[in-house]
Image: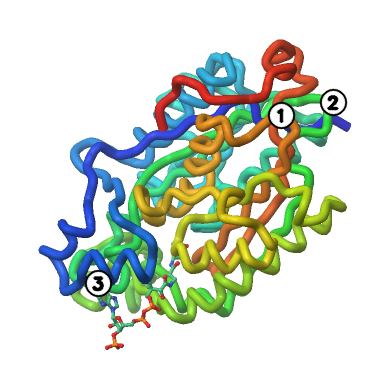
Amino acid sequence: MPYAAITGWGTALPHRILTNQDLEQMVETSDEWIVSRTGIRERHIVSGGESSTSLGAGAARAALAKAGLDAGELDLIVVATATPDDFLVSQACLIQAELGASGGAFDVGAACAGFVTALSVASQFVTGGTYKRVLVVGVDTLTRYIDYQDRGTCILFGDGAGAVVLEATEESRGLLSTVLGADGNGHKHLYVPGRTKYVANSARLVPESAAIFAEESPYMKMNGREVFKFAVQAMGDSAVEAVAKVGLSFDDIDMLIPHQANLRIIDAAARRLDLPREKVWVNIDRFGNTSAASVPIALAEAANAGALKEGANVVLVAFGAGLAWAAGVVRWGVAGVERHAAQASEPVAASATPV
Ligand code: ACO
């Protein structure tokens, strides 16, 4: 049975940067409060013509370039997002059109746990022998649904995209274990009203209509404390389970790539795996919570920094609205992928692709 090696990775970020100092001018908050409670200093947010499509396609192009593949060689595109640009057309189809690719294209919805969930779905098409080359994109533009008068949410989120290319190999590479979970009863702790709400006395589902604006704010609602408690538990438990499933001990883990939601949540997950800080990839200070893009952006950054060597064991773990969670162990590298034979004998190291 083949494995699904990650042979390419890339990111795309909006141009506009929103700093904690900018937020101090918008709501009653302070840089000191935000940094000490979350670890965030700044985040990128969409403006102008930027969208989930433009960011997702940008990350995909970078990942394809790294893999040395043309978009036309892809068999399938799987996109994790909670913020598609169209309500009806999948984000994957919109990105496929931008890339000029063909083959299958569909979305996976698991909010911030979306990329790890999509990676597990996509990997199965490769390990099951159905497809050889699959693009997985995590993209979100959640700031479009944030109330910039609500200091409980507006300090946390940023926008962005990350992507990886999966290719078949006979060597044990790629996602080796998966843990998925959800507690649907927790949906009330984190949601965006309006987009999927039935208007009273109507059979129609009206997105973002004036009626909904009048009735209830259409922006994200979050019970931060509940989400925090859940996240600490879910991230720790699922990461531990993903490591156990693949028969490894914590000592065998070379890097933890956690969802970047709050530095205190990341630290709690690292403690559960008994990992020192240098084995935990943290970039929340620069990007905030980019939802489904968070894990692939961090993964690409770690790869570009040369922090992931051929054969490294990497734990991915994420949680989000749903409430849902996802974790997995990835064995990094391209061993066994013929086109990458030369690269496989070298550590997969830093490259010129900027993050
Ligand atoms: N600036 C200053 N003060 C603030 C701010 C702010 N931005 N936000 C809240 N406060 C105040 C509160 O009003 C409260 O004041 P009070 O004690 O007078 O009532 C005080 O600070 C403490 O508030 P808490 O909500 O208890 O603060 P907490 O330490 O829990 O931090 C936070 C809040 C950062 C939101 C935290 O709960 C958290 O990170 N939760 C997880 C959120 C998360 O990860 N969501 C994303 C999920 S992923 C997805 O799917 C999108």
Q: Which residue is mark 2?
A: 170
Residue 339 image point, x, y percent: 70, 12
Q: Is residue 142 above or below residue 57?
A: below
**Residue located 50% across and 22% down the image:** 351
Label 3 near ligand 1 (CB < 8 Å): yes
User: Please, what is the three-letter code of the amino acid marked with disc 3?
Assistant: Arg
Give the mark nearer the N terminus: 1 vs 2. Answer: 2
Q: Which residue is mark 1?
A: 310
Q: Residues within 10 Å of mark 1 (few under 14, many from 20)?
A: some
Indicate the quadrant where residue 132 lies.
top right
Q: Is residue 194 left or right of residue 186?
A: left
Q: Which residue is mark 3?
A: 151
User: Please, what is the three-letter code of the amino acid marked with disc 1?
Assistant: Glu
**Residue located 54% across and 14% down the image:** 70
Q: Residues within 10 Å of mark 3 (few under 14, many from 20)?
A: some
Residue 348 image point, x, y percent: 64, 25
Q: Quadrant of the C terminus?
A: top left
Q: Residues within 10 Å of mark 2 (few under 14, many from 20)?
A: some
Residue 255 image point, x, y percent: 64, 46
Q: Quadrant of ligand 1?
A: bottom left
Q: Please name whichever residue, 198 or 253, is drawn nearer the observer in this view of the structure.
A: 253
Indicate the quadrant where residue 165 lies.
top right
**Residue located 52% across and 35% down the image:** 300
